[in-house]
Image (cartoon, coloured by chain):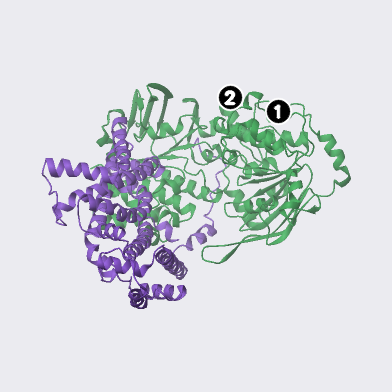
Amino acid sequence: MSATAPTTTPVAPPTEALAVDASPANPWGRARLLVALRRVVGRVVAAVLVLLGAATVVFLAQTLLPGDRATLLLNLRSGEAVERTAAELAPINEQYGFDDPLAVQYATYVGGLLRGDLGVSYQRHAPVAEVIGGQLWPTAQLALGALAAAWVLALVSVVVTAGRRSRAVTAAGSGAEALAASVPHYWLGVILLVVLAVNLQWFPVMGGTSPAATVLPVLTLAVPLAGFLGQATRDEFDRVLEQPFVTSARARGMGDTGVRLRHVLRHAVLPAITLSGWALGALLSGAVIVESVFSRPGLGQVLVAAVDARDVPVVAGVVMFVAAVYVVANVLVDLAYTLVDPRRRS
Amino acid sequence: MTATPSTALAARPAPGADAGPGAPLLRVENLRVGFTRGGRTTDVVHGISFALEAGRCLAVVGESGSGKSVTARTLVGLTGAGASVTADRLELAGRDLTALRPRQWRAVRGAEVGFVLQDALVSLDQLRTVGNEVGEPLRLHRWGDRHRRARRVLKVLAEVGVPEPGLRARQRPYELSGGLRQRALIATALALDPALVVADEPTTALDVTVQAQVLDLLAQTKERGKAVLLISHDLAVVARLADEVCVMRDGVIVEAGPAEQVLHRPRHPYTRTLVDAVPSEHTRGTRLSSVPVTLASHHGVTARERAGSAAADATVPVLEARGLTKRFRGPDKVDRTVVDGVSFSLGRGRTLGIVGESGSGKTTTARMALAMLTPDAGEVLLDGGPWSSLTSQGRRPLRRRVGVVYQDPLSSFDPRWSVGRVLADAIGRAPARVPDPRARAVELLELVGLGPEHLDRRPLRLSGGQRQRVAIARALAPEPDVVVLDEPVSALDVSVQAQVLDLLGDLQQALGVAYLFISHDLGVIRHMSHDVLVMHGGRVVEHGPADDVLADPQHEYTRGLLAAVPRLTTPGGP
């Protein structure tokens, strides 16, 4: 027994260390449930306030814009541009309440919103909700498809090229992402259209909303977004690859692909998830351009036509809709974030 | 296949210290490691050799940059990008590790060698459950089916002393206390019952009582017949576990031998420096470092002048706390009392040590002493006058009298400021206008053992010890009466720590400044303090002269804390 450390008096594990451990024992304890509930309520209240703010701005824009709304409405419907007499305007003012005090008009507008009534299109005579609803699906297809495609492109690029020993591979990946992020939708759409549809004839030049005709518009929206998501994910991916827990995983016998997919990726997607809330809203505005490049029906076309014609209720309706999408998207982002990173629950 | 833990699990008597001439489990001869970056190769390990038998523990001791961690990683084939490894012999159980291909390495890792890193908070994947992490080596090495793996996870967790393994396996690492988390990390390394466990600083960043538990666990692993390779900078930790010790410096083993001999009768001067640098109850009043520090003549207010001016009120404590209480509201809206009725008094030119584990409230107490935080009850007096009760405006002219030094000086410096600017800023707060701030800055640098060439450096370009010296110079620039030192040496290597502690001692003698010294390290506290305050759960459990409290502790908690501290020497004699 040549080498026993002389002073190692064994120490019984102190009991208080165990007592400390007992507190987070039950992940679904009452206190946690309350915290979670309070968060949800807080989120909903915040969302309602944001929507109310948007509604107020939209309402003020409608009422305070120069030009008489009744005149605008009559001219739009008749396709003329003339001065209207008081006798012509009176029934319109009566019908739409343009003469009411501002506060009454505001209350009527917000009240209508609560019932899902976005007003009536000056141009088409139809309720705005119907006008938007009729064109919603093609745009939703486009935006959701682009979001999914962007995620796939970004993740593949990052997982395959980030943090590789070969400088060339890493540089190719991050270079491609930087390039993709800086390409304007308009330019990319035209290039794809000319090369893949007109010259190579792989896709229809104009095919409405058929699946084949959806591919190029989705790509046009997805590529720049993939660049953004890829850049955000790559930074985090590189950082996480250096973390001690990754070394731990390798020391258990895990290969490089396993480490990337099972450990690093989950940490690295967090910033991109946060970005996705903004991205979904941005995709809707991107859709305006892409739909006109590909002459595709959708919300973008509705908006362009409404702006051209000064069909104010339709423009206002689209703005409210986009605001609602932003709000819902951010709640979903929060939910997804919590699923991926349960630390946020506590 | 590679993993046969069921047979290996059978309790096997540990081979005695004088095991027969059987081949050692791990054999390393003339190991060299270099890194190539940007076409330039830097050698980090220059031909080291050691061997380790089953049932034994070999400790590799060294300071940062010694190459000890690189050595540990090389044993699992994870030296790093751009590394070149050569060795005359690198054998595990008779198998040549240098010839392994990546796929073969993966079969070795986890199954034949378990690897434990420091700080489970970053060494376990926080987004996965503990059960997933412990079960990962089993899954990777195709051990059993899913149900057998789940049972094995619970068994291993129970073996490392995790209570309620079923519950813990479903939790994530951040939901566990530091001690349980570190046990879970060790469980991941032991899941396949590897013959060799490599532990790289397994107890760094742990509280002393938790550290004692983890060391006991590693000792049990050794007794079960496993070979343990322990990498550590802490000689006292090593003394508790190791049978043999290698001391590494700059990539070379300078001394190797039985632990008892290396730690108590070191032959190499560097080992002696390391051993002497460990502060303890026996080192008070002595110098820890062999580097002579000559205090430059101080042209500011001398100690004598200060003593003279203070003579009138020598009995008034320079800093006094009366019944300090602070509560914080948690996310669940429940108030927690973090500091509960803490009182102390600090005499002029004295040192009061506050010791406690994480969560004991010692840093909150320090922040109230600095008047950065307003107490909910009680007050702090400066020189017998109001301090914590003043308005921030009223406190401003007095601020310069209380200095502060933090654990991590880097984060307390503006990274864009040069050392000269940092000091000039602090000199600007001195009581009298300094006619030549630059000369005064040079003087301050000399005082803390640095030269004028450091004036134009940025903090990032300084070593840890130099940074802490600059932080001390900054704290002293406005000629304070008290300096609050919050874990000032916890981030430093032991020999640098020794130099900084010596410097603080010299400065106190020369300038007559009082220290409120906060540390989790009882050895450091013992070495530095005249009086000691032991904190636990926000309360003062023991308070008095350092010799009384630490030599004859009255409170059970203090006794437990003292017993848990790993020591180099037997109490009572060096």
**Chain bearing mark 2:** B
Left or right: B220 in relation to A84:
right
Earlier-in-chain disc, 1 versus 2: 2
The color chain B is rendered in = green
The amino acid on which the numbered mark 1 sits, given as a three-letter code, is Arg
Find disc 1 in the rendering and name its residue. Answer: B438
Left or right: B407 in relation to B127:
right
Instruction: Say which element carries label 1.
Output: helix
The crowd level at tag 2 (other Cα within 10 Å; few <14, some 14-19, many 20+) is: few
B421 over A99 or under it: above or below: above
Find disc 2 in the rendering and name its residue. Answer: B269
Q: Position of residue B193 (x, y in %)?
A: 34, 46
- Please name the residue shown 23% across and 63% down the image: A135
The Cα–Cα distance between marks 1 and 2, rounded to whole angstroms, is: 39 Å
**Chain bearing mark 1:** B
- Please name the residue shown 14% across and 56% down the image: A210
Q: Quadrant of the N terminus of chain B?
A: top left
The amino acid on which the numbered mark 2 sits, given as a three-letter code, is Pro
Quarter of the figure with residue A32: bottom left
A316 over A180 or under it: above or below: below
Left or right: B224 in relation to A184:
right
Q: Position of residue B372 (x, y in %)?
A: 66, 52
Q: Which chain is purple?
A: A
For the residues beneath circles 1 and 2, the answer to whether they share a chain is yes
Q: Position of residue A247 (x, y in %)?
A: 37, 41
